[in-house]
Image (cartoon, rainbow, N blue to C red):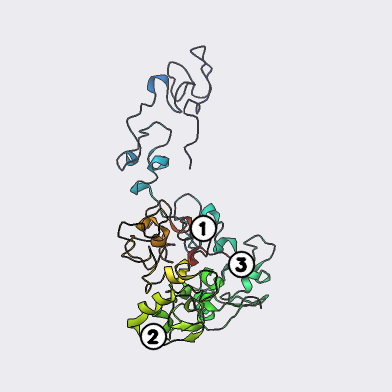
Amino acid sequence: MSDSGNDNGGGGSGANNNGGSTQTTNGGNSSNGGSGGTTLDGQGGTTLDNMCTPTGTEDNDTACGDGVDNDCDGFVDCMDFDCEQVAACIKPAEASNPACSDGIDNDEDGFVDCDDDDCADLGVCHNEISNAKCSDGMDNDGDGDVDCDDSDCQTEGIVVCDGTTPVDVDPADYESLANEACTNGINDDASATNTFTDCGDNACLINPDATACKGLPREDTNDACSNGIDDDLDGSIDCADKGCQREGIAVCNGTIPVVVPPAQYTTASNLECSNGVDEDNNGHIDCADFGCSKNPDVTTCPESTDDTCGDGIDNDGNGFTDCDDFSCSQNPYVTVCGDLELTYDKCSDGIDNDGNGFADCNDFSCKPMNGAPNPACLSLP
């Protein structure tokens, strides 16, 4: 939708030039107001005797639901861009892997799933990466390879293919078998270059059949890295998980567990995040490392806690204060900045949770220009 078009006339058949003789076709067109006609000086569908008269703006609940083109721009109610942010006109976004694979026209624009441009760059449409697509005899992603001949169909969680060989599987079993393949602790990919296992593999995170991999908790805190559980189902537990080898995780020294009483988590993590040492060798030191600045146990980093993100002070001196600072608004452990769009559920619910005008994968919080996107927004190369 766009507010395009010529507000100075057009739309009817025939023409009248400055009061001269009329030329009439199928319904006529006259300066005297023939039925169904228009003049070059009028608005489409009107006459000089019945021109659209603006009655006010079209940007509120009343004006966007009264069936009238209040601002005379040629668009009525929710078809007018000015109504775009009015509650009654806001449609769920169709801009996430789940929303682009559910068979529903979520945003009511007349295009369903992969036929919607908002879905084009997402994994479920950009890649041939579901059991249904890998067994339908079609080249869904247009790369020249069909079904099991497509490398996308040789990934973990695709149970209708054993390498390039098709496997007969009842569609009713797609979900249960995909979940089994994506949680068995084994790297089931046909490719030897893919070293990721289970829900740590983007193929499982994108595949709509692998429901066990959706909305999992993070494994990157002292608590999660010392509980003996594979919280994110990536096949690695506690210090064996890369998320637990980050700077600021005091219970792990690389892959080696370190005994730290929970009451000492904050003290130990603060010490690690203020010693000037790049413990995880990623080129970022102390609070410049997300392992420290996005860590619920670290309080030494500015604009990274509920206290420093709600004190009205630009603690890190970058010109942005509290929730206007990405250090606060994109920190999953900060709770004072409202309904953040950072989780799998919030990045696939069709709602603009943080009220910035962008929902789901159209929001940089879910799909940043640089950095890893939320799993709801993933795509394979």
Give the answer, above or below, for where 378 lies relative to 268. above
CB atoms at circles 1 and 2 under 8 Å apart?
no
Q: Which quadrant of the rendered structure holds the C terminus?
A: bottom right
Q: Nearer the viewer, mark 3 or mark 1?
A: 1
Of 354 and 54, the residue lying toward us: 354
Which of the numbered marks, if any, corresponds to residue 113? 1
Residue at x-position 36% and y-position 78%: 267
- Graded by Cα atoms within 10 Å as few (under 14), some (14 to 19) or many (20 or more), the crowding at tag 3 reads few
Question: What amino acid does circle 1 point to?
Answer: Asp
The answer to whether 377 appears left or right of 189 in the picture is left
Q: Quadrant of residue 261?
A: bottom left
Question: What amino acid does circle 2 point to?
Answer: Val
The residue that mark 2 highlights is 260
Q: Position of residue 260 (x, y in %)?
A: 39, 85
Earlier in the chain: of badge 1 and badge 2, it is 1
Give the answer, above or below, for where 330 lies relative to 10. below
Question: What amino acid does circle 3 point to?
Answer: Asp
Which of the numbered marks, if any, corresponds to residue 136? 3
Q: Quadrant of residue 262?
A: bottom left
Of 324 and 352, the residue lying toward us: 324
Marks 3 and 2, Cα distance to the nearest angstrom?
Answer: 53 Å
Marks 3 and 1, Cα distance to the nearest angstrom?
Answer: 17 Å
Secondary structure beneath label 2: loop
Of 215 and 66, the residue lying toward us: 215
CB atoms at circles 3 and 2 under 8 Å apart?
no
Q: Quadrant of residue 342?
A: bottom left
Secondary structure beneath label 1: helix
Residue at x-position 44% and y-position 51%: 108
The answer to whether 276 appears left or right of 78 in the picture is right
Secondary structure beneath label 3: loop
Q: Position of residue 335 (x, y in %)?
A: 33, 65
